[in-house]
Image: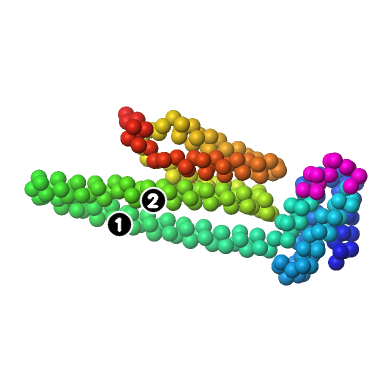
Amino acid sequence: MTNNIKDRIQSDLQQAKATGQLRSERIREIVKSAVAQLSSEFKEGSSEIRTIVKDAVAAVVDNLQDKGTELKEEVTASIEGAIEGVNTNRHAAIVKTQSELQKLQAQIDSEEEKIQQDVDGILAEIQETGKEKTSNVKSAIESAVDTIKSSEEVALLKKRYAQLQAQLAIVRANMAARYGGRGDEVQNYLEEAKNWYNQARPQAEALATQVEQKRSQLDDKLGEAGTIVAQKERQIKHILRDLLLATADLFKDKEPTDKEVVHK
C-alpha cells in the first residue's frame, strides 16, 4: 500500500515537473486523486486511511525536499489534497444532501407564500365587509387588519431567519473551499448567501450611515468572492474567511430605532 501510493505520486510529480506544471495546485490534485482512489478500498476512519495520508504527504516531501524553505506551500498543498481525497465520498454525500435540502426549502417557501396570499385575501375580504359597517366598526376593523399585516414580531423573525441562512451558506462555502468542493459548488453557496442576505435587508426607508456602509462592504465582498471563485485562485479561502467575519459583524447590528430611520 505504502509503496503503491508513493510510487504513483512520485511518478505524477516527475511528469508534472518535466512539463513545467509542478505548481502547488497541481500537487494538491495529484495527491487528492491518489488518496481518493486508494482510500476508497478501506473503511472510513480506519488506520489504513491515516497511513495512506501520511505516506502521500511523505512522498511529496521526499520528492521536493531540495527546495528548502520554499517547500512550505507544496507541503500545505499536499496536506490539503490528502484531506480532500480522504473525504471525497463524504463530500459527495454532503453535496447530494444539500441539494435535497435546497429543494425542500424551495417547497417550504412556496407553501409559505401560498399561506401569505390566502391570509392577504382573507384580510382584504374582511376590510371590504367593514365598509358597510358604521364608522367606528369600520375603523376598528381597518386598525385590526393593519396590525396583523404589519406584525413587527413576524417581520423580525423572518429577518433573523434569513440572516442565519445567509451565514450558514457562507459557512458551507468556506467548508467546501477547504475540503474539496468544486468552484461551482462554492459559487452556488455564495449565490444562496446573497439571496438570503437580500431577504434580510430591513424594510426601513433609510438606515443609519454606519449600517449602510457595512452592508455595502458585504455586497463588495460577496462580489469579490464570486470573482475569485471564477478565477479558481487559492486566495478564495482568505476571501471567504473575511466574508464570514464581515457577515457576523453586520448581523450583530441592532434593529434601527425610530431615531436611526430617516423618513422622507
Q: Position of residue 143 (x, y in %)?
A: 19, 46
The residue wearing badge 2 is: 157
Dot 2 alpha-carbon crowd within 10 angstroms: few under 14, some 14 to 19, many 20 or more: few
**In which quadrant will I find the N terminus?**
bottom right
Q: What segment carries the magenta color?
A: 65-76
Asked if residue 131 can be seen in this view, the reply is no
**In which quadrant will I find the C terminus?**
top left
Q: Position of residue 71 (x, y in %)?
A: 84, 44
Disc with the residue nearer the chain's start (2 vs 1): 1
Does residue 213 sit above or below 177 in this rendering?
above
> Which residue is at a point 88% across and 42% down the rendered structure image?
68
| Three-letter amino acid code of the residue under disc 2 | Leu
Dot 1 alpha-carbon crowd within 10 angstroms: few under 14, some 14 to 19, many 20 or more: few
> Which residue is at a point 74% across and 59% down the rendered structure image?
85
Q: Position of residue 110 (x, y in %)?
A: 41, 57
In the figure, is residue 153 to the left or right of 198? left
Choose top left, top right, bottom left or bottom right for residue 32: bottom right
Give the secondary structure at mark 2: helix
The residue wearing badge 1 is: 118
Q: Position of residue 137 (x, y in %)?
A: 11, 49
Asked if residue 190 can be seen in this view, the reply is yes
In the figure, is residue 114 to the left or right of 47? left
Find the distance from the CA under tag 2 to the CA under tag 1: 20 Å
Q: Decide whether residue 205 is among the magenta residues.
A: no
